[in-house]
Image (cartoon, rainbow, N blue to C red):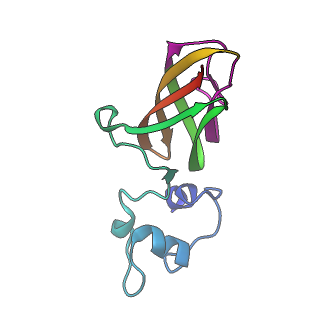
Amino acid sequence: MSQVNTELGRSATATISLNESAVRSLAGVPSGAISMNDLRGKSAVTFTPDGGATAGTAVYLSSDVAFETATVSIFCSQEAVWNWTRSGSGTPAATASIVNGGSGTNIMFVLDRFDYGISQYTFNVSATAGGVTRYWTVMLKVENV
């Protein structure tokens, strides 16, 4: 039950019951008999927008703007560890609100507008929380021509 508490974002030693609505919701058993087996492999972690289950199925997110700042945000219902790589060109360089390997509940990728030209960056991103890992490809582009 301590693992169920942790999955629900509680202290591992918090008082818990199989009949609690949060536990039933996690198990996917709204009423009737419920057992620990109903909780095996279940996760309360959600990402918005949801990412791909593997690097090969990464979800593509983009912000392509002219004369503005390009931004993309990803949120997690629990604290996640965020890993990313960046490629591209332009000045200033695109940034992430969490350092590679850092943790938090949301990350924002930003490419500030600049004086003249085209600036474009791509981030390959993964996040892990509660044993759940998701993947995204984030593209930011700003055109000031």
At x 36%, y 42%, the residue is: 52
117 is higher (above) or lower (below) than 23? above
Is residue 111 covered in magenta? Answer: yes
Looking at the picture, how far across and down is residue 47, in whole percent?
50, 50
Is residue 60 covered in magenta? Answer: no
121 is higher (above) or lower (below) than 23? above
At x 43%, y 36%, the residue is: 136
The part of the image, by quadrant, that contains residue 80 is top right
Q: Quadrant of the C terminus?
A: top right
> Which residue occupies the foreground of this view, 56 or 16?
56
Looking at the picture, how far across and down is residue 92, in whole percent?
67, 15
> Which residue occupies the foreground of this view, 9 or 123?
123
Count up the numbered dots.
0
Find the residue positioned furthest to the left. Answer: 56
12 is higher (above) or lower (below) than 135? below
The part of the image, by quadrant, that contains residue 8 is bottom right
Find the residue positioned furthest to the bottom. Answer: 32
> Which residue occupies the foreground of this view, 28 or 141?
141
- In the shown orientation, is residue 89 left or right of residue 97? left
At x 55%, y 32%, the residue is: 82
Which range is magenta? Answer: 86-114
The part of the image, by quadrant, that contains residue 118 is top right
- In the shown orientation, is residue 16 left or right of residue 124? right
> Which residue occupies the foreground of this view, 83 or 107?
107
